[in-house]
Every structure is written in structure tokens, then in C-alpha cells.
Image (cartoon, helix red, strand yellow):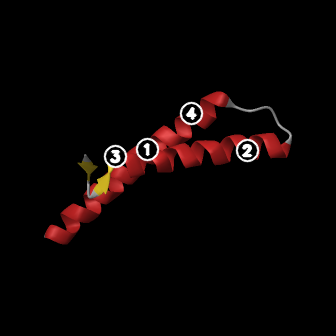
């Protein structure tokens, strides 16, 4: 399944990578892991990347 020219699997794996980086960063920094932030940021990243790709796709068609 494709969303704006990229597969759903690729988008989910990218969002998962963002989540892992945030958790590792929190752990390495010695602060407590902020789970709400670490779960919201990848979801927003996923949404933002879809919207940007849709905008670029639409802009290139015109």
C-alpha cells in the first residue's frame, strides 16, 4: 500500500526509527524517559511526512 508515493511499511519503519532514537537519547542523557513525547513525536512525524509528500506530489502535477 502506498501513501503519496512511499510504501506504508517504509513510513512506519521511519516513524519507529524516530521513536527508538528518542528513547535512546532520553536514556543516554540520563533523564527519565518521557513516554508521551516519545509516542507523539513519531506519530506527528508520520503525519507531517505524508502531508509534505502529498503537497510535493500535488505541486509537481501542476
Pointer 1 with pointer 3, Cβ within 8 A = yes
**In the rendered image, which quarter is residue 59 located in?**
bottom left
Which residue is found at the position 65% from the left and 29% from the top?
35
The quadrant of the rendering that contains the C terminus is bottom left
Q: Between residue 1 and residue 33, name the one nearer to us.
A: 1
Residue 34 appears in the picture as rendered: yes
For numbered disc 4, what is the local secondary structure?
Answer: helix
Q: Report whether 62 appears left or right of 11.
A: left
Earlier residue among tags 1 and 4: 1
Q: Against 32, is 10 above or below?
A: below
As measured in the structure, the alpha-carbon distance from the residue carrying label 2 to the one carrying label 4 is 13 Å
Q: Which residue is mark 1?
A: 12
Q: Which residue is mark 4?
A: 39
Residue 38 at x, y percent in the picture: 62, 36
Which of discs 1 and 4 lies nearer the camera? The answer is 1
Given this view, does label 2 or label 4 mark the residue nearer the observer? 2
Q: Earlier in the sequence, mark 3 or mark 2?
A: 3
Marks 1 and 3 sit apart, C-alpha to C-alpha, by 6 Å
- Identify residue for label 3: 8
Q: Is residue 6 above or below residue 56?
A: above
Using a 10 Å C-alpha cutoff, classify the residue at mark 3 as few (fewer than 14 neighbours), some (14 to 19) or many (20 or more). Answer: few
* Sequence-first tag of 1 and 2: 1
Residue denoted by label 2: 24
- Is 62 on the left-hand or right-hand side of 36? left
Query: Can you name the residue that lies furthest to the top here?
Result: 36
Q: Foreground mark, 3 or 4?
A: 3
Which residue is at a point 40% across and 52% down the rendered structure image? Answer: 10
Please, which residue is most extreme toward the left here?
62
Disc 2 secondary structure class = helix
Cα distance between the residues tagged 1 and 2: 18 Å
Q: Dot 1, how many residues are within 10 Å of its Cα: few (below 14), some (14-19), or many (20+)?
A: some
In 3D space, how far apart are the residues under numbered discs 3 and 4 (Cα atoms)?
A: 18 Å
Amino acid at each position: 500500500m502506498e501513501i503519496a508515493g512511499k510504501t506504508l511499511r517504509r513510513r512506519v519503519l521511519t516513524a519507529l526509527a524516530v521513536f527508538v532514537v528518542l528513547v535512546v537519547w532520553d536514556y543516554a542523557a540520563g533523564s527519565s524517559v518521557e513516554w508521551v513525547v516519545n509516542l507523539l513525536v513519531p506519530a506527528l512525524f508520520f503525519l507531517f511526512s505524508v502531508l509534505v509528500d502529498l503537497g510535493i506530489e500535488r505541486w509537481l502535477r501542476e
